[in-house]
Amino acid sequence: MKMRAFVLAVPVLLFAAGSYADTTDVKTQSRVLVKKMGKHCVDDPNCFNRYHPAIKPVATAKPGQLLTYETRDALDSDLNVNSVPKDLGAVDLNYVHPLTGPVYIEGAKRGDVLAVTLIDIEPDEYGYTTVVPGFGFLRDRFTEPFIANWKLNHLEAVSDQLPGVRIPFNGFMGTVGVMPGEPEVDAWEARETQLGKAGGVALPPQPTGALPAAVCGPNGSHKDKCLRTIPPRENGGNMDIKQMVVGTTLLLPCFVDGCGLFIGDVHFAQGDGEVAGTAIEMGATVTVRTEIRKGMAAMIKTGPHFEGGSQIKQLEPDRFYATISYPIKKAGEIPPQHKYLGGDKIGPLVNLSEDLTVAARGALNEMIDWLVKTYGWTPVQAYVYASVACDLRIGNVVDVPNYAVSTICPLEHIRK
Amino acid sequence: MSRFRAPWVGTGCGIAMHRRRFLTATAALAGAGLLSGHAPYRQWVVYRQTHLVILTSRDDPGADDLGEKCAAVMRTVLPESKAAVGRGPRVQRIASLIASRQAEVGIVSQANAAAMFHGEAPFGDIGAIPLRVLVQNDVYRMVCRDDFPRQHAYLIAEALAGSDAELGLVVPKQNEGDIPVHAGALAFASGVPLETGESR
């Protein structure tokens, strides 16, 4: 009702005034623009794809200034609306993630918190969701490549690969963070090396394709210390938290003077879990505003915090269907997420104890089967829908041994 | 099916044995890749090393067309190869993926193969790649790294150079100064049998 009254009031006021001013060119706030240059990150001095404190800032901004970043898609890809699955077979993961920045925030010091409020996201016209074999939460079930090409605007995304589906725009920064300091690089590299030796998924520094080449490339000054951007860490990065929408404020601990704020890998929309491995991935123009909270970084130890208001309510479905599952599996099955720990103990068990991963896999598999049966989709179409729209939610972590996880899918986006 | 077999392969279980060997060698290759520390993204590598991904590029439709035909032949002759085409945007992507061990096999023009081998433009940023030739026709070469398993090279050469799919592919003779031909492909062309249990 309020909106309707406002819409009616505006023409009345204009009529009363008799004329109105064109305010398009009136600037009341200063803005720092970090432009995208060239077709790919390698062509762009404002783009990088590894973390190291030796990577120099490309711009400087004052707290409170509007700060606009032109960003690239997560794969720095050449994918387009005509792309087909075989185009995924030649994606080069050395280029993940092309990030815009870093930007030096005046006055920010190590130990401060940088509060980053998301002001606006302008989406590109194209986005994609991919199923890459070997990647994704159900990588043991979905073993062949698939791509959904999305046509985007400010309202919604539609795809020929998911006919009848319209995904509303709830954009957020999939990757946003600050540069680590030397102590963080050393500590994070050490723990990830340890994990890799134990058989876990850990990505060592990879100079091939690393940018900026002068620091991280094959002949770079710190080629063996530049961290990959795929895992999120205490500095933020590839967190993929869908609630970090316009109006919310992200709190990042500063590890270097000036913080080195970077942004990239923007998502048009995503479900909690991003289960297929990708959301609706896109390039975008992102505007933020920063504030320094002096000496507050000690409060942020495990990962960034974020705060907001009613934005979170806008993400909830109008109508939904949900599945629930527990840490129960088939005897002999070793989920891919558990293989690095060895299967001697897990394999024979049907019921695992207090295991959210197995519970989540069960709820997601059940939802995919329901979507297939209800809407006549293929399983991979259902998987993609779950990745961009459905939420994995933890129900309880107390009812031993069966912690409960649900998959909640909005139904109002499906028009069949 | 029999026309795809090398002369020394008798009737019966020859192809089946090859398939088993291909799988065995694939697993060994994947394991080697993981242990070598060169795998930049292990989950993806698992796919690329359990499928024979033949790289082509969008900027060379002829190579892409040939890649599709080769993949179809491979899927027929050696289904366990799970051959598929991976199409990059430009030929430089093929060089980057092979150089960084994210992929094994690609089809490029003869000129581009030579430039990749020597690290010349347009591949100067990537550097020289230790390529080997598997098969070729008048225009294109199917190339791989020098450490590509001998058995794989043998079976690919057998499937593609021995096929009548009008691909026009042959295992070339080794010419001095040219990109070396893979030892496995040469073994097939020379009529040397692939020994049971041979993995490289």
Image (cartoon, coloured by chain):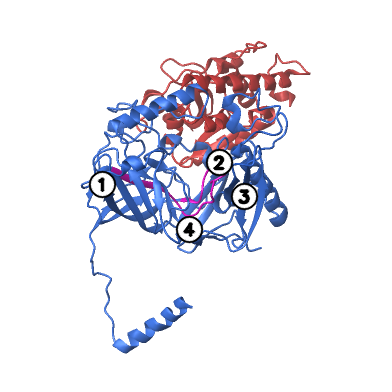
In-front residue for pair B5/A386: A386
Colour that chain B carries in the picture: red
- Viewer-nearest of discs 1 and 2: 1
| C-alpha span from label 1 to label 2 | 50 Å
In-front residue for pair B165/A288: A288
Do callouts 4 and 3 point to residues on the same chain?
yes
**Image position of B134 with respect to A23: above or below:** above
C-beta proximity under 8 Å, tags 1 and 3: no
* Residue B157 seen in the figure: no
Mark 1 residue element: loop
Do callouts 1 and 3 point to residues on the same chain?
yes
C-beta proximity under 8 Å, tags 4 and 3: no
Q: Is residue A266 magenta?
A: yes
**Which quadrant of the figure has residue B160?**
top right
Name the residue that disc number 3 marks: A407
- Viewer-nearest of discs 4 and 1: 1
Mark 4: which amino acid?
A: Ile
Q: In this view, does B77 lie to the left or right of A89?
A: right
Name the residue that disc number 1 marks: A294
Name the residue that disc number 4 marks: A312
Do callouts 2 and 4 point to residues on the same chain?
yes
Mark 2: which amino acid?
A: Lys
**Which quadrant of the figure has residue A333?**
top right
Start-end of magenta stretch:
A260-281
Residue at 66% from the left image edge and 33% from the top image edge: A352
Where residue B189 appears, as percent x and y from the top left, is: 59, 16
Mark 3: which amino acid?
A: Thr
- Residue A86: mark: 2
